[in-house]
Every structure is written in structure tokens, then in C-alpha cells.
């Protein structure tokens, strides 16, 4: 084994050990999935329970935070929910990104962080974990309204907002 291979193995253990220590310091119970190189746990937020999979990539010293809601959304509302997600992303910048798992019809969020050689502080790590959890929690009510609202056939009502000065319809359908 060359020195560089030894250093690589040492970095792997250090990243995994560092994450385990930070999770323990935050008093988060977790399960290590060796096949996926990940820590798996749940966090209870104000409105939702968020399941998290914290994947550690040793070679690049990266942590991937993949979070999802355990409940499934109705498949027929997926397009409307995607529009709402785009609206949410347009209105505010967040280090986490929300999306839909098409196969499972689940609302998900993800974030990534590079881990410097000297590690992460507890505050930075906690903010990294909570970015996805807060994104899902803070937008839960709005997204569920969109996902479960009943579609009513819309009727065009002519107002000053959708008619020109002569009263002609300006809407194109």
C-alpha cells in the first residue's frame, strides 16, 4: 500500500468519524448504511417528520443531504406541485433545493457541502442539516394545498384586468 492510498483511507475514516461525532453532539440518533456510505435518521420539524440520508463521499470530501417527506403526493397533482416548487425557488434563495421524486411521488430536498481538511464546526454542520428540513417544513402547508386542492372548471369572468379599453377579451386560450 502506498502512502497516498493510506492517506485516502485515513481521510475516509476521518470524514465518517467526524460526521458521527457531530450527529452525536447534536443528539441525533442515526443508523449507518455501509452500502450507501450514509447516515440515516429522522428529524421532527414543526409540521412534518423529515427522513434524512446524509451521504458522505470520502474522495471528494463532500456531504450530500438528501431529505424527504414520508408521505406520498397524488400523482395527478405532480405538475401543479412542480409549478409551486419553481415559484418557491424563484421567490427566495436557499442553499437547499426542493424537487419531486417521480417514482415515489415524494417531496424531497437536497443540499451539498464541501468538508475542509480541518472539518466542520458544529454550527455550520447544524445549518447544513437544517437547510433541507426547514425548506420542506416551511413550505409544507402551501405545497399540500396545491397537491390536494380540488380542480374546478374555471370560467372566464370579464373584468378590467382581462379586457382592453374597448371591452375586448385579451386572454388567449
Image (cartoon, grey):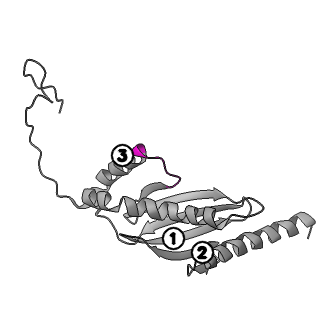
Q: Quadrant of residue 20?
A: bottom right
Q: Main secondary structure of the magenta part?
A: loop
| Region of the chain picked out in magenta, as a range | 90-96
Considering every residue shown, the one lying at the far top of the view is 166
* Residue 34 magenta: no
Q: Which mark, by number, is residue 52?
A: 1
One can see residue 76 in this view:
no
Q: Which mark, by number, is residue 87?
A: 3
How far is disc 3 from disc 2 in space, using C-alphas? 31 Å
- Which residue is at a point 61% across and 75% down the rendered structure image? 23
Q: Nearer the viewer, residue 66 or 49?
A: 49
Mark 2 element type: strand
Number of residues whose C-alpha sits closer than 10 Å to that of mark 2, classed few (under 14), some (14–19) or many (20 or more): many
Considering every residue shown, the one lying at the far front of the view is 123
- Which residue is at a point 72% across and 61% down the rendered structure image? 61
* Residue 95 magenta: yes
- Which residue is at a point 78% across and 61% down the rendered structure image? 117
Q: In which quadrant of the rendered image does the N terminus lie?
A: bottom right
Q: Contact (CB < 8 A) between labels 1 and 2?
A: yes
- 63 on left or right of 40: right
Number of residues whose C-alpha sits closer than 10 Å to that of mark 3, classed few (under 14), some (14–19) or many (20 or more): few
Mark 3 element type: helix
**Of pointers 1 and 3, the one earlier in the residue sequence:** 1
Residue 48 is situated, as x and y percent measured from the top left of the image, at 38, 70
Q: Which residue is mark 2?
A: 39
- 70 on left or right of 149: right
How far is disc 1 from disc 3 in space, using C-alphas? 24 Å
**Of pointers 1 and 2, the one earlier in the residue sequence:** 2
One can see residue 143 in this view:
yes
**Of pointers 3 and 2, the one earlier in the residue sequence:** 2
Q: Quadrant of residue 150?
A: bottom left
Amino acid at each position: 500500500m502506498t502512502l497516498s492510498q493510506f492517506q485516502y483511507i485515513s481521510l475516509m475514516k476521518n470524514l465518517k468519524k467526524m460526521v458521527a461525532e457531530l450527529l452525536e453532539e447534536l443528539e441525533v440518533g442515526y443508523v449507518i448504511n455501509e452500502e450507501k456510505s450514509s447516515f440515516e435518521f429522522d428529524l421532527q420539524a414543526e409540521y412534518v417528520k423529515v427522513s434524512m440520508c446524509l451521504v458522505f463521499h470520502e474522495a471528494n470530501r463532500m456531504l450530500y443531504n438528501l431529505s424527504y417527506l414520508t408521505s406520498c403526493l397524488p400523482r395527478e397533482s405532480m405538475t401543479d406541485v412542480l409549478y409551486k416548487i419553481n415559484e418557491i425557488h424563484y421567490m427566495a434563495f436557499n442553499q437547499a433545493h426542493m424537487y419531486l421524486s417521480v417514482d415515489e411521488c415524494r417531496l424531497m430536498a437536497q443540499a451539498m457541502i464541501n468538508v475542509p481538511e480541518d472539518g466542520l464546526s458544529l454550527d455550520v454542520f447544524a445549518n447544513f442539516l437544517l437547510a433541507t428540513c426547514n425548506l420542506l417544513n416551511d413550505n409544507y402547508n402551501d405545497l399540500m394545498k396545491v397537491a390536494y386542492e380540488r380542480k374546478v372548471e374555471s370560467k372566464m369572468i370579464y373584468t378590467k384586468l382581462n379586457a382592453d379599453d374597448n371591452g375586448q377579451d385579451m386572454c388567449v386560450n
